[in-house]
Amino acid sequence: SPKQLGGRVLRVREMYDLYLKYMEIFSGNSLPEPQSIYNTTAKLVFLHALRDAKEKYVAGMNETNPKRKDEPETMENLRKLHNNLKKQSVLHFTKSTKFGDADERKVYQ
């Protein structure tokens, strides 16, 4: 079954990031503080949500291929497309499951 974190299915890249960070935390001779594990997980979840939102924006911009008829013909149309995709990406990021307190969330928003 797929691995989940905070109710969200993890992708291979995200699992890889988590394993690298956890190996780094546990590489010492003593056990890490639980808070450092939590903070690391929270930071990675935020960064993955941010990357997802950016990928959504970039994919939308890339769909506007100059060889297609739905190409924005003017800068105004391109600005509208950008603003619409930006709004969708921010909404996607906002709806993503995140860890951490309100102060930590402000850093990434």
Image (cartoon, helix red, strand yellow):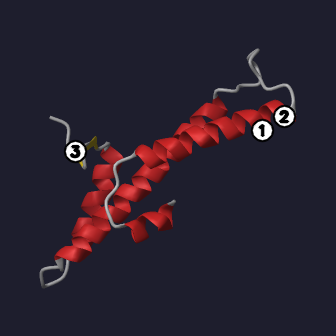
Mark 2 → mark 1, Cα distance in angstroms:
5 Å
What amino acid is at disc 2?
A: Glu
- The residue where tag 3 is placed is 4
Mark 2 → mark 3, Cα distance in angstroms:
41 Å
- Name the spot of residue 93 as percent of width and height, x first: 47, 47
Earlier in the chain: of badge 3 and badge 1, it is 3
Q: Nearer the viewer, residue 67 or 75?
A: 75
Q: Residues within 10 Å of mark 1 (few under 14, many from 20)?
A: few
- The residue where tag 2 is placed is 76
- The residue where tag 1 is placed is 79
User: Of discs 2 and 3, which sits in the foreground?
Assistant: 2
Residue beneath the point at 60% across and 41% down: 87
Residue 68 visible, this angle:
yes
Residue beneath the point at 48% across and 66% down: 106
Q: Nearer the viewer, residue 79 or 30?
A: 79
Mark 3 → mark 1, Cα distance in angstroms:
37 Å
Residue lying furthest top: 69
For mark 1, give the secondary structure: helix
Residue 52 visible, this angle:
no
- Name the spot of residue 45 as percent of width and height, x first: 35, 56
Residue 67 left/right relative to 58: right
What amino acid is at disc 3?
A: Gln
Residue beneath the point at 75% across and 34% down: 80
Q: Residues within 10 Å of mark 2 (few under 14, many from 20)?
A: few
Residue beneath the point at 64% across and 27% down: 63
Q: Nearer the viewer, residue 76 or 102?
A: 102
Residue 46 left/right relative to 26: right
Q: Do the CB atoms of the residues marked 2 and 1 lie less than 8 Å apart?
A: yes
What amino acid is at disc 1?
A: Arg
